[in-house]
Amino acid sequence: MTPYEYLRIAFDALAANKIRAALTMLGVIIGVASVIMLVAIGEGARTYIRTELMGIGTNLLIIVPGKTETTGMGRIPSGIQKLTLGDMRALEKRATLIPAMTAVVVSNAPVKYGNRMRNVEIIGVDQNFEAVRNLHVEIGSFVTKADVDARRRVAVIGRTVRAELFGEANPLGRMVKIGETKFRVIGIMEKKGVTLGMDIDDHVFIPVETAQEIFDQEGLTNIITQVINEKEIERAKQQIRAVLMERHAGEEDFTMVSQQAMLSTMQTILTTFTYVLGGIASISLLVGGIGIMNIMLVSVRERTREIGLRKAIGASQRDILLQFVIESVTLSVAGGVIGIAFGAGVAYGVKAAFPVIPVDVSAWSVLTAFSFAFMVGAFFGIYPAMKASRLNPIEALRYE
Amino acid sequence: MMDTTAAPLIQLESVTKVYTTGAIRYEVLKGIDLAVRRGEYLALTGASGSGKSTLLNILGCLDVPTSGHYRLAGEEVSRKTDLELAHIRNRLFGFVFQSFNLLSRYTAEENVALPMTYGGLGRRERLEKSRRLLARVGLGDFTRHYPTELSGGMQQRVAIARALANDPAVLFADEPTGNLDSKTGMEIITLFGQLNTEGVTLIVVTHDTRVASHARRVLSLSDGRIIKDEQNTVVEST
Ligand SMILES: Nc1ncnc2c1ncn2[C@@H]1O[C@H](COP(=O)(O)OP(=O)(O)O)[C@@H](O)[C@H]1O
Ligand SMILES: [Mg+2]
């Protein structure tokens, strides 16, 4: 008999009991659908976080004031010192593994142009910010060293700010009010969109010392440093620690956050997530498989006479075995296909609802789900099929 | 028709069949010697429980003897593999049961086509042939009917058509008229007569005396032994 013939018999048998077939498939459908769905969303989240962090650069090391203890409560800080431009100058001189760094002051203020106003995050930066953060000006120019040193009142605005305040008008050379201070617009940033939950386009950049002056801040919000390469991050940390502790009276009152560390933490979380998913998937497929085995055993019992008859008219043990294995594989694979379709549907629904998460049903997850469904059918179908194939034809025909 | 010179197609030698249920042994067949040649029309008669069905099942390779020899066309059946036996049941033998044993989810033509499926014939050829066979048993107009839509006599004729699907050399029938009224039973008997005329070897278990009277040879079983083996001199014409 050709494989097609077995398949036909399987379909006929399953079609004769549609509701039962559907209920039996449910276990596999739920298992496969949840895997497809969650893997797609998980992968989407992973890709999202990775590209976000990669966009910032994996060799970045951010220094923030204050000590975040990672072990226990730690000691009570004795006189936290601010992170200052002086600290940065010292690092520029002595931290040889850090070729580039930029000082950042972050604050909030209303920005006004004519009668339009918008509350935006104002970022005080220096001339290195563009290169270190990989964010670039598109029209006009960025903040220069001279702007910083002379504490000029110049501003580079993001796309959203531009659209909100100026509409179609050209902002270059115009005066905007940040708080109560007038600034001249010298540049417009390229469109960047949302990264790490921050809308880069909704920012205004001004010289760092100007920011300190108008917001009356001595310290810096953070210093973003760019380590020579990823491998040197640990040594770069040592250099920073040495320089800053010397300047801070031996106190380590600052924290260094590497993108590397964030990335690997995220990866660990997502890997755990994937294992948990795998566990859920295996359990639901196992349950689905047991359901299939159960129904196949019932089916073999119910069709005892049919099996006897088939043997009497020339079916071999192999024919009967294949017939029932193919029937159970048909069940599980059909469940798998429905599950894949269903899971993918939900995943793409999530994508439609949350476009920032790049949900994608990957070929490998479909393939894996499909082959697992197939294997579940084959594995759990074998025992009932063997039982069927070994029936004595006469006893089977006599079965009531 | 009957070839008396050739070696017998079927040969049994001191065949026994013992069933053990718990501690009790039932010796259902107690040493059967039997030779059947090609083209014979044999009726197996005897009281209920005398072992007729058991013997027929062994002859049809659906069951195996407890001891003794069964040679089919000179070859020892006990040495055959499951695949060889399946092939014999499929190609060489046809089986008709008292309770028809049609599969209810298949139409008449699909039921008849079943043995051809295992015989490896394509679907279209199978259905063509099963329609021819159904026409031959007088059911040319019922090919697409399901068994439940047919009368008992019609169902048995479908079963006969199915038994003939792969042009078997031997047709086995166990009480084929047992579930039918006498008129439809007679139709089946007539059909058997025709088949035998066409060269099919027939072995029919029956306690219907009319069936027996149409056979050329009548065997009587009693308590697991053959007590009579006679040639019918006057065969009822069909
Ligand atoms: N599987 C079995 N187990 C035990 N006893 C059986 C079995 N099959 C048949 N028998 C017994 O064997 C005897 C002969 O049965 P059977 O060949 O069906 O007789 P017949 O067809 O002549 O009525 C009966 O007594 C029956 O109960
Ligand atoms: Mg009987």
Image (spheres, rainbow, N blue to C red):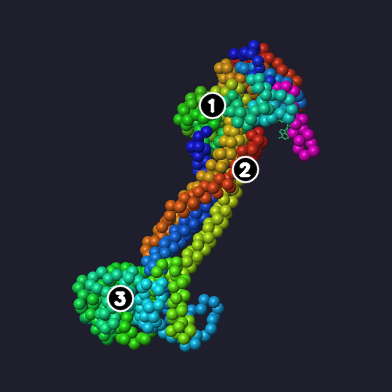
Q: Residues within 10 Å of mark 1 (few under 14, many from 20)?
A: many
Secondary structure that dominates the magenta span: strand
Please indicate whether residue A33 sits to the left or right of residue A226 in the image: right
Tell me which amino acid carries mark 1: Ala
Pointer 3 chain: A
Dot 2: few (<14), some (14–19), or many (≥20) neighbours within 10 Å?
A: some
The amino acid marked with disc number 3 is Gln
Residue at numbered disc 1: B165
Q: Depth-wise, is mark 2 or mark 3 nearer the camera?
A: 3
Question: Range of the magenta residues?
Answer: B12-28
Residue situated in front as seen by the camera: A112 or B68: A112
The reply to whether the C-beta atoms of the residues labelled 2 and 1 are less than 8 Å apart is no
Same chain for mark 2 and mark 3? The answer is: yes
The furthest residue to the right: B23
- Which residue carries the number 3 mark? A127
Q: Toward which corner of the image does residue B95 lie, by quadrant?
A: top right
In percent of width and height, residue A21 lies at 52, 48
Residue for point 46% across, 61% down: A42
